[in-house]
Amino acid sequence: MIFKALLIGSTALAVGALFHPKSSTKLLGDIDVDWLAYELEFDQILADDQTVSLKSGQYMRVYSLSGVPYETRSLADQEALARSRATAFHQFLKPASTMRFFGIKRSRDVSYQSDWPTCTLKEIGEAEQKIYRNAYSQSWYLVLTCPTASDLEKTCRGLVSAFDNYAIRPVLAASDLEQPCELTSFINYLITGEFMPNIGRVSKSISANVPACDLNISIDGVIKTTIPTEHVNKIIAVRGWPETLSGILISKILALSAEIEVVQIAKPLDSTQQIALFTRTVQEQKHNFFGTFSQLAEYEGVLEDLLNDEHHIFETQFQIAARNRNPQLLDVTLEQITAILDQARVLYSVETKGAAVAWFNRMPARDKLIRPLRLFESNLATLWPFQFSPVGMWRSPFGDRPIRLFKTPTGQNYALQFHVSDKPQSPGNYIVFAPTGSGKSTLIMHLLSGLAKFPKVRNYVFDSKDGARFMVEAMGGVYQGYDQLALNPLDTDLEDKAAKLRALQIFRLLLGNEYTDDMDAVLSTSLDLAGYLPIGERTLNNIFAGSFPKLSPERRILAKWISDDEREGQYSHVFNSPRDQITGFLEKSFLAGINMNEALEDPVLGPPVIAHIATAISQVAQKTDGGFSIFIDEAANLLRNEGFRKLALEMYREYRKLDGLVGLAFQEPGALLSVEGASGIIENAQTMFFFPNSNVDTKNLEPFNLSNEQIAFIKGEGDMRGGRQVMVVKRFEADSFNESAIIDIDLSPYGDALRFYRSGPAPIRELNQVKSEWGDQWLSHI
């Protein structure tokens, strides 16, 4: 679904291995084995620092491509891109030129050092570091060879223009001979299979630049390269294509956790010769007693395309090279690759005697192919969509590290940040859509605990039903129920206008949806009365009788928040503490969890409680310069309160000015859309997390402007689905920023550190037992 499909016939064998909607495949030819009898074909780098002359008299250039993130592209856009690639190949690649397509995956250490505030987070950090010390990076390259320098220049201009969407750029030689040379590094890669980014350009001569490599090729197909570390390589070559195929094949192969190279050599054939060949074949077929009308129709269709210059035929070779230091692990990789090919019904050979030929076919001027198959440019364009998975951001306003690293289905690494930029006060609000049991709490705690690497950043979790309690405490944070907190919005300097306005806002929320503007006068008078009371006596209970006239709506509504001789209000235990101690609780730890329980489900109780705590958080933030995050679980019912909706919008719009970010979680998008003002929250959420949910109503996804590919993933229908995956969508229109990535949130590779990611009554009982047994040292004994 991501890439345009290929359709192949089954009869054009007489004209040799044609791969096209009107034809099929056959292996042709043989070649002289002379790979080490002569010198390498590379001669020298020319003065333009991008062209390489070959000893055959040809010229070569190398281009790097970032690729295209298809997750954010509509199907129509994807088809348009495929047509554009085919047009470029048809228009600019001429006979005697050769294009080599490379998709390369190599190991890369992307781990990083961080200081952690607790021993448990240090263990988690070290586990993450171990995983991503053995990560991989993926690269796309085009290598173009032409017979003359002028042909090369003309062809390159056309291709660069046509591939602008793929962030194409030339691979250049270093202008300073003492500096690392990217072009020399790539040429060295073609010879040895090893990228050496620090290799220098000590001379114009290629032979002087490329280090020696001990290359050992045996007749059983094993290629050993020593530079100086020994790697074992094997090559799989395609012998035939099925009737249908898509570009997802290459993505699936490169998604494997291994060092892999996918290469295709494409040589345009002379159309005049092909027209003559097909004309003769058509005539032969017409007079063939054993021929069929379907065969004749295929040949005539191909001939018509050639006569109308609708297609060009390319002689190609498609091969996959895998390598590993361990031969047994290499065999495992080969089994995984062949399983993908078998599933796609691709015919292949694990090369033995032909391995050396295939290895040197990767290099320019080695154009006698061992497994030639003929394709049209549309087939090449479909096979090579150059898929790009975003890599995220390594820096944010909080610091020069990602929050956490994740894998993507294409095997690349994604550095997750809530923010969309590393500029100060950059927005970073988020929304989470996750059905029950999907692992939402685990992911959020994994992310928020990752923020602990930034010393001054504080995290606050409004939790539901103890879902995050074990994780908060196990990671070194503090956790408490909202009803155990000492809350009092009147315990403030009521002579200060800003403080009085904050208290007035809480009173408005206490009145709920029955609040009207004309109540402000009564509420303001009650605050004035509270200001006359000594500190420690400014409570709702103490001002209730003297502030709100009998039979007034304010008195009737606020009665549920107080207790006196006549009544015991339903919520009287919440805001009547003599002193407000929420600030002290918030400052206890870098990570504070508050169990809201029924408050999150109660649109009367939850809004004023969260508003009061959020106000305290903002006040703490104004005294520090480290930033903070607020996460509110199960927010749908809270947003039914008009006052809380206004507060939520204010937090989303204004808290970034305090270096804060806010996240809300919902069971599914419909829960957010069912409340008034949902569009304001969506517009001010720069990051959205979509967990797979096959029951989601597609209509509820329309306000998020998602592509067909993104919707397919959410509904569990994506091409690269599998494992525990979440889609991250990041947008910021002010910077024209639009990014989408599918990340693997399976934390099982963290090994023993996974014990810190639990929830439920049993782990909490175990935690309490550890505390009782080990006292102050309990954290190191979980």
Image: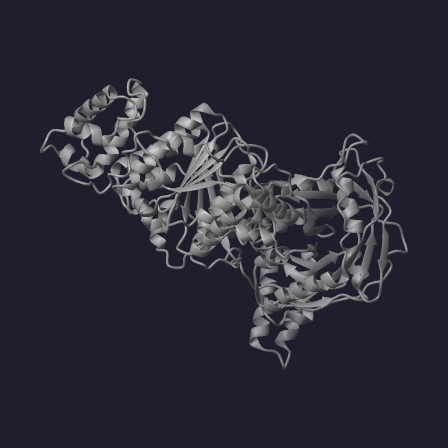
In the rendered image, the residue lying farthest to the left is 551
In the rendered image, the residue lying farthest to the right is 37
Q: Residue at x 60, y 58 (%)?
A: 252
Q: Position of residue 363 (x, y in %)?
A: 78, 51
Q: Position of residue 103 (x, y in %)?
A: 66, 51
Q: Residue at x 77, y 31 (%)?
A: 175
* Residue 80 seen in this snapshot: no
Q: Position of residue 69 (x, y in %)?
A: 54, 47
Q: How many marks?
A: 0
Q: How is the image coloured?
A: one colour
Q: Residue at x 27, y 33 (%)?
A: 576
In the rendered image, the residue lying farthest to the bottom is 289
Relative to residue 449, is residue 657 depicted above or below? above
Of the pair 185 and 415, the residue shown nearer to us: 415
Relative to residue 563, is residue 720 depicted above or below? below
Which quarter of the picture shows residue 287?
bottom right
* Residue 691 seen in this snapshot: yes
Of the pair 15 and 212, the residue shown nearer to us: 212
Of the pair 772 and 430, the residue shown nearer to us: 772
Q: Position of residue 574 (x, y in %)?
A: 28, 38
Which quarter of the picture shows residue 240?
bottom right
